Image (cartoon, rainbow, N blue to C red):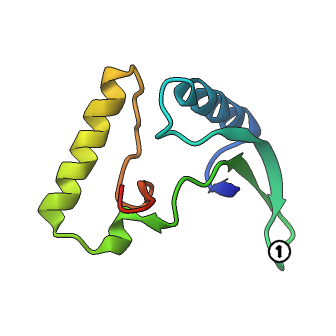
């Protein structure tokens, strides 16, 4: 289980994103399953953030592999093209949110 903490959003936007995740997950296993939206108390603070509970797809983020920049850009482009062909528009794809599992 992973939690995506949304810093600059409200519950309605989080629910909308969660619904997009659910739809995208029906098209490919490269999108995590979404389990819902939750308010999360910030440790030692008097406020909450909105979080999306989702499946954890891998144990390493792409940037942690320390691949050459050209290779990372190619992988991002391949993911964008793959998602686009499925009708999925990912507006924030980067090396920090591409998870790698078993070097795949």
Q: Residue furthest left?
A: 70
Residue 20: image quadrant is top right
From this viewpoint, which residue is outermost toward the front? 102
Spot occupied by residue 77 in the image (x, y as percentages of width and height): 22, 43
Farthest residue in the bottom direction? 44
Give the image quarter of residue 79: top left
Residue shown at the point (41%, 36%) measured from the top left: 90
Camera-nearest residue between 12 and 4: 4
- Residue closer to the observer: 53 or 91: 53
Dot 1 crowding, Cα within 10 Å, few <14, some 14–19, many 20+? few
Residue most extreme to the right? 46
Q: Position of residue 57 (x, y in %)?
A: 55, 53
Q: Dividing the image into 4 quarters, which one contains the C terminus? A: bottom left
x, y percentage for residue 62?
Answer: 36, 63
Q: Residue at x 46, y 40 (%)?
A: 30
Residue 71 against residue 67 in the figure, above or below: above
Residue carrying label 1: 45
Q: Where, by quadrant of the figure, is residue 73 drawn?
A: bottom left
* Picture residue at 32% right of the left edge, 26% below the top: 84
16 or 62, nearer to the observer: 62
Q: Is residue 47 left or right of residue 26?
A: right
On the picture, is 15 further left or further right than 39? Answer: left
- The quadrant the N terminus occupies is bottom right
Number of marks present in the image shown: 1
The spot of residue 65 in percent (x, y) is 32, 72
Q: Residue, x 56% and y 24% (percent of image)?
A: 26
Q: Give 14 or 30, whichever is nearer the viewer.
A: 30
101 vs 89: above or below: below
For numbered disc 1, what is the local secondary structure?
loop
Image position of 72 with respect to 44: above or below: above
Q: Is residue 87 above or below residue 102?
A: above
């Amino acid at each position: 289980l992973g939690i995506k903490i949304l810093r600059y959003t409200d519950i309605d936007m989080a629910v909308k994103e969660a619904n997009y995740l659910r739809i995208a997950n029906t098209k490919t296993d490269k999108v995590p399953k979404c389990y819902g939206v939750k308010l999360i108390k910030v440790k030692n603070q008097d406020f909450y953030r909105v979080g999306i509970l989702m499946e954890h797809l891998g144990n390493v983020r792409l940037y942690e592999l320390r691949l050459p920049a050209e290779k990372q850009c190619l992988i991002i482009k391949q993911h964008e093209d793959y998602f686009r062909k499925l009708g999925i528009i990912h507006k924030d794809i980067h090396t920090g949110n591409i998870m790698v599992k078993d070097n795949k």
